[in-house]
Image (spheres, rainbow, N blue to C red):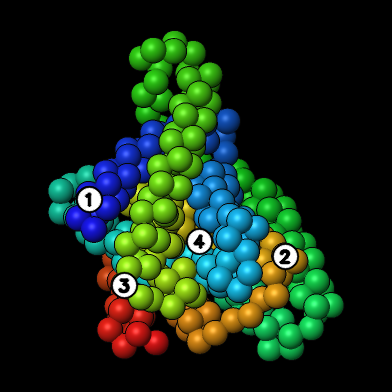
Amino acid sequence: MLELILWLLLSILIVFISALLFVNAIEFLGSKYKIGGPFVGSILSPLFTSLPELIVLIVAVFGLGGVSGEAIGVGTIFGEPLMASSLSYGLVGIFALVGFLLKRREHKSLQVSTTLAVPFIFVTILFPLTLVPALIANSNVRIIFGVGFLAAYFGYLILMYRRKGTEQIENAKAPYICRIIPSQPVGAIVQLVISAVILYFASREMVGLVNQIALGLGLSLMGLAIIVVPAATAIPETASALIWGFRGKDTLSIASLVGEKVLYTTLFPAIGLLVTTWVLDIHAYLSVLGTTVISLIMLFFISRKKIPWWGLTFGLFFFVAYAIMIFWLRI
């Protein structure tokens, strides 16, 4: 078990380093081609960093298969929004405070664009609707909701694309790889691809290690998928958000996390509804409750264009409560 834990820590370190490369490249490209922070953070970044979760979903449903495979795949879908809303937001708040104390950012509060209200509204409205097909338990209803969620994601892409010019990224550093490749745009693309590939393989290894460790603790499959798998697969986007938050790029930081949540309230549920029987238990319902409450809190602060660092730590209470329920009470 100790060896597994050491390998897990190594894989986490590799993921964090690759996230640094990823953040550097995507910041430069966003600045170079005049793409606003909200669009970079909420659309482009999540599409790359969500690759590990997509692989987990596909492997669980089609590789493992059966009731167990569906439980892990569906649990991953419901686990990621809860993980982003609880642990990830809390860590961003703490890093923002540390960045302020170390004079790496000007404010303790996160100054954000009101454009971020769009993805939070999507999450607040659509995530609770993912429970409806499970309550009705009809294949036609699953298909209708699956197609509906897919359409909602493309609608979200259009809305955010129309706002892609807002809050331009400034003072972006040249890609690190440009010390080897002179052309900055080419170097940025190469670095982005390399970092995404490393994120994929390191995250896949990390998920396998987490599964081995967690299964030895005798957790329920959906409970395992909701809290343990996302704890590992959320590291790429969380690392990106922490780096941006520490440096004072607040809209990018929050957008990268809420953009991930939108994927898990539209595109990923659409896939799950179309390829599984969508059987849920209490863990999924608690995930929806926690994510929705925290999203409403964030919407309140975003309407004021300022999120206090302590406001982001509310989610930590949900994370601790859920961890106690899984690991101690074994629910």
Name which quarter of the figure residue 270 lies in. Answer: bottom right
Which numbered disc, 1 or 3, marks the residue that appears first in the sequence? 1
Real-space Cα separation, disc 1 to disc 3, in angstroms: 16 Å
Q: What residue is disc 4 on?
A: 258
Q: Residues within 10 Å of mark 4 (few under 14, many from 20)?
A: many
Q: Residue at x 49, y 75 (%)?
A: 222
Disc number lying in front (4 or 2): 2
Real-space Cα separation, disc 4 to disc 2, in angstroms: 25 Å
Q: Is residue 228 above or below residue 102?
A: below
Circles 4 and 3 in contact, beta carbons < 8 Å: no
Q: Is residue 171 above or below residue 144?
A: above
Secondary structure beneath disc 4? helix
Q: Position of residue 19 (x, y in %)?
A: 38, 41
Disc number lying in front (4 or 3): 3
Circles 1 and 3 in contact, beta carbons < 8 Å: no
Which numbered disc, 4 or 3, marks the residue that appears first in the sequence? 3
Circles 3 and 2 in contact, beta carbons < 8 Å: no
Q: Residues within 10 Å of mark 2 (few under 14, many from 20)?
A: some
Q: What residue is disc 1 on?
A: 3
Real-space Cα separation, disc 4 to disc 3, in angstroms: 31 Å
